[in-house]
Amino acid sequence: MIRTIISTALKVAIVCLIVGLILSAFGVDPWQLYPRVGALADDAVGAVVRFASWAWRYIVIGAVIVVPLWFALFLLRGGWRRR
């Protein structure tokens, strides 16, 4: 168990070193990245909100057709009495 944890930690450290070297080659500083993490979270939340505001109309339009058809088929198949 401890061997697996040490092995995993070593692999993660090696990958972090490689990524850090690559980012350093592009002139990225860790202190430059830190403020961008908050902006990234804000951008992600904004994208989800924009998608939801776009998609809800189409979901409602589809539900106008799908839900009554599903309910009719549910009742025709015996509905809740099914085993």
Image: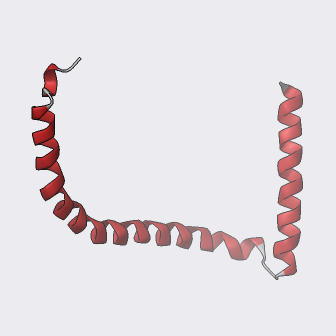
Residue at the (82%, 49%) spot, across then down = 12
Q: Is residue 21 above or below residue 83?
A: below
Query: Position of 16 compared to 31: left or right?
Result: right
Of residues 53 and 44, the one nearer the viewer is: 53
Residue at the (89%, 29%) spot, across then down = 3
Quadrant of the image for the N terminus? top right
Say which quarter of the image contains residue 5: top right
Say which quarter of the image contains residue 36: bottom right
Query: Position of 13 compared to 83: left or right?
Result: right
Say which quarter of the image contains residue 25: bottom right
Of residues 7 and 75, the one nearer the viewer is: 75
Query: Position of 42 compared to 12: left or right?
Result: left
Of residues 79 and 48, the one nearer the viewer is: 79
Q: Is residue 50 above or below residue 3?
A: below
Residue at the (40%, 66%) spot, across then down = 48
Quadrant of the image for the C terminus? top left
Q: Is residue 35 above or below residue 71?
A: below
Residue at the (36%, 69%) spot, across then down = 51
x%, y% of residue 2?
86, 27
Query: Position of 47 compared to 57: left or right?
Result: right
